[in-house]
Image (spheres, rainbow, N blue to C red):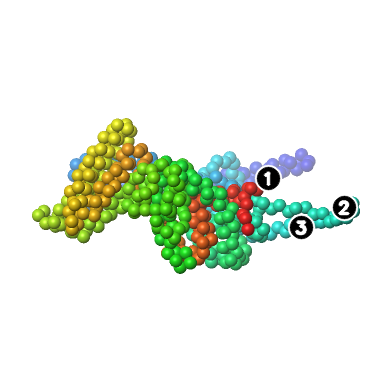
Amino acid sequence: MRPEEIIAALREENGQLRAEAVALRLENEQLREELEVVLEQVAELAQHKRGRGVTVKPSRAQREGPKKPRKARAAEHNTSRKRMEPTRVERHALERCPQCAYQLSGESIDYTRQVVELPEPAPVEVTEHEVIKRWCPHCEAWCSPQLDLRGQVLGHGRMGVRIASLVAHLRTTVRVPVRGVQEYLETVHGLRLSVGEIVGLMHGVRRALQGQVDGLRAAVRTSRVVYCDETGWREDGQNGYVWACVTEGPEAVRYFEYNRSRGHLVPQHILGLGFRGWLVSDFYAAYNLLRGQHQRCWVHMLGDLHALKEEQGEGSAPSPQAEVVEWATAVREVYDDAQAWLQEQPQATPEERQGAYERAYQRICELGQQYAQADGHPCRVLARRLLRHQEELFQFLLVPGLLAHNNPVERSLRPLVIMRKISGGTRSPTGSQTRLGLASVFGTWAARHLNPFRECLAVLQRPTAHAPP
């Protein structure tokens, strides 16, 4: 570009800038005038407010005395919503001023906003493995490689381990019916499976995880504390029972097993003859013959005491009803005092624990002896129960960490109870074994705060995972 052209361009740009400067000075003067008007209005409003004085709504009650200090919230509630790690960042910025269209410069983040969304569901991937055979002129035979798909499919099936893990997770953890799993796979991933194929996948996953199930039973047998309970279950229309054994802690275990019997041989078979830990259970007689130490569930005991008081009512002092209520309340007080002592003495020595146990033991024996021989008395049944299990009521005072109830196993059985109420049970021994085996493994992973789907997939992807036909 020639010098005269450059000078002409600069003069033209200078003229434009002068015009913009004049326009900005005019706009600035106009804004100043508007600001003066607004400030005058604000001053008038402030003066008017001071003249009105302070008023209190008639409906508001006047506080008496100094204002109480606000209760501080717990530390875990003083945090904002946890921000997720972004997988993609989109920048939003202006190039020019929206008022005067002047070029903007410099930058800093004003605020951020996260939007969580699912990507478009991927359709199923169908891989066709072509096994090529080739001719050997020397041997005069066709040769082809041996196809090994271990870790990709279960047995000789066509569904991959990821689909199998998803089906098992939806059926066991999320408790989706078979038709619901069928609808989900077809709607989201475009995969149509029959009911029989879904059930077959469940059986295949259970066979692949059978080693995990056997390991859980072995872990229960060597546990220090085991919580046991049972609930009804129907198999092919016949009544039976699901037996549950649960442990707590970092290596928590959830183990379920079906049996037609409700006798003592079933828990003895599950725990083994060598079990020497503490067994926490209700007062069902099938647990009486099991070896090891026992802690009976106080929640069941307190429920029976409450039912006894409800039956007798709240009578006056001289009446037999008041006598029953007084006795039941005294039994409850022994338990409450034991729990209060534990809370006050979290670091108690073994000698202190033994002393607290002996005091509670003495009090409960006296209450049991009060009506154990009184034929026809309303308290006789529970009084005899106290004497029968007098050494099994306060083991939680002696053993640190031992609970006085079997609520862990009650909560673990609740999903199976819901399944039973919806489906009515299972139709075959294989169905019961699959349902309870998967409930054991997936329930254990959930109790250990692991992702059941990921854990199941990791096991099935191992080349050593084997599902016998």
Instruction: Give the residue number, with chain letter if any, for mark 3.
Output: 130
Can residue 425 be seen at all in this image of the molecule?
yes
Q: CA distance from mark 3 to mark 2?
A: 23 Å
Pinpoint residue 190: horizontal percent, then vertical percent. Answer: 62, 64
Quadrant position of the N terminus in the picture: top right
Picture residue at 65% right of the left edge, 42% below the top: 14
Do residues under tags 1 and 2 come within 8 Å of each other at their CB atoms?
no
Q: Secondary structure at mark 1?
A: helix
From the image, tell me which residue sits under label 2. Answer: 139
Residue 125 % position (x, y): 67, 58
Amino acid type, residue under disc 2 in the picture = Cys
Secondary element under disc 2, as helix, strand or loop, is loop
Tags 3 and 2 in contact by the CB under 8 Å rule? no
Determine whether, in the image, residue 364 is placed left or right of residue 204: left
Residue 448 seen in the figure: no
| Image x and y of residue 361, in percent | 25, 41
Q: Can you give x and y, in whole percent of width and height, for residue 341 in the image? A: 27, 38
Nearer the observer, disc 1 or disc 2?
A: 2
Tag 1: amino acid: Glu
